[in-house]
């Protein structure tokens, strides 16, 4: 099987490169053509002029875009040329309802849609160690799995269409809570006058050890917030989570609501393009 990748941002570019290294990449497309033109993949890889051109040559198309409307736009753009039994694997974070609608539209062309959101950050995309949570037809996933294994180390089928996105919502709530805990704890430590290198080393070796502390602890206390995972994108994801909860649940999402409020304050200060660890700025300022 041959792959196409649509969307060559921080995550999609690494996915495309890893597929190319495995000899599985047929075509790429990005809204900014220069990004596709300069991506370090083989000369035989088609730098397509449209999503439709990608769909015409690929058996599995990985989409990696930002928002719900973008996913449906890419599905519609591919539809005229998509092959019967082609599999679209969307790694974006969108609503479960959008995933189900995309699946419906592609089913009308005898093609498959899998919602395949991922977790693991830019590092995971680069190193092909992402966790991938998949909703949709399990048989289609098994056909695509050998290819998807070149971009993700853990691939789990979660259920019918939308289940992958519902699982990603769980992940994004946890990320929000961890972000709050780590940034607040490190801001407290700094306010206590502690040597933060030592704090991170010792705390990161005990019960409080976690990925975010390990990957972002030293950079945040140094005042560096290069993404990573952009704060504005996590804000978008948590807005989706809140909307999903309003459809199905009656209880509050305390961590989500608090994180959205803090992110909105940081975004009003022009921090939306920074890593989510920029929450440390706010926590640190609260301690004077």
Image: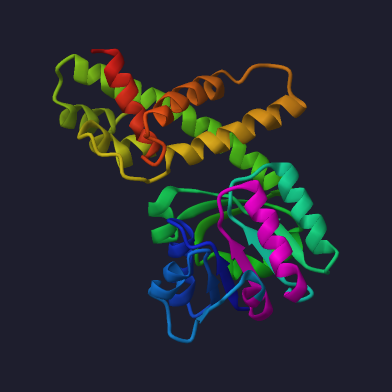
**In the rendered view, would you say 184 is above or below 12?**
above
| Residue visible at 27% across and 24% down in the picture | 186
Observer able to see residue 258: yes
> Is 196 part of what is drawn in magenta?
no
Residue 159 in view here: no
Above or below, 283 against 210 in this view is: above
- The magenta region covers 53-81
Front-most of residues 228 and 81: 81
* Residue 86, quarter of the rendered image: bottom right
User: Which of the 4 image quadrants contains residue 110?
Assistant: bottom right
Residue located 20% across and 20% down the image: 190
> Residue 46, image x and y in percent?
53, 81
Residue 267 placement, left or right of 192: right
Q: Residue at x 51, y 25 (%)?
A: 260
Which residue is more in the foreground, 261 or 198? 261
Q: Which residue is at a point 42% across and 44% down the rendered structure image?
A: 229
């Amino acid at each position: 099987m041959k792959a196409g990748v649509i969307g060559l941002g921080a995550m999609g570019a690494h996915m495309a490169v890893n597929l190319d290294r495995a000899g599985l990449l047929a075509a790429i497309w990005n809204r900014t053509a220069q990004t596709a033109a300069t991506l370090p993949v083989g000369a035989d890889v088609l730098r397509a002029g449209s999503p439709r051109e990608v769909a015409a040559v690929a058996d599995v198309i990985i989409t990696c875009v930002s928002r719900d409307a973008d996913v449906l736009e890419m599905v519609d753009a591919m539809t005229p040329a998509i092959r019967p039994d082609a599999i679209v694997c969307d790694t974006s974070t969108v609503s479960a309802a959008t995933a189900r609608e995309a699946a419906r539209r592609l089913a009308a062309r005898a093609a498959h849609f899998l919602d395949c959101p991922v977790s693991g950050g830019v590092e995971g995309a680069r190193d092909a160690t992402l966790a991938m949570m998949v909703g949709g037809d399990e048989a289609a996933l098994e056909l695509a799995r050998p290819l998807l294994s070149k971009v993700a180390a853990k691939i789990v089928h979660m259920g019918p269409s939308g289940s992958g996105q519902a699982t990603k919502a769980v992940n994004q709530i946890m990320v929000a809570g961890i972000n709050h805990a780590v940034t607040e704890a490190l801001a407290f430590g700094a306010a206590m006058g502690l040597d933060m290198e030592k704090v991170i080393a010792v705390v990161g070796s005990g019960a409080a050890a976690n990925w975010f502390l390990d990957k972002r602890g030293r950079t945040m206390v140094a005042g560096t917030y290069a993404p990573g995972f952009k704060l504005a994108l996590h804000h978008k994801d948590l807005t989706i989570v809140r909307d999903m909860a309003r459809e199905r649940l009656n209880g509050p999402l305390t961590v989500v609501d608090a994180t959205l409020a803090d992110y909105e304050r940081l975004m009003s200060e022009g921090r939306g393009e920074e890593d989510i660890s920029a929450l440390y700025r706010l926590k640190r300022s609260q301690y004077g």
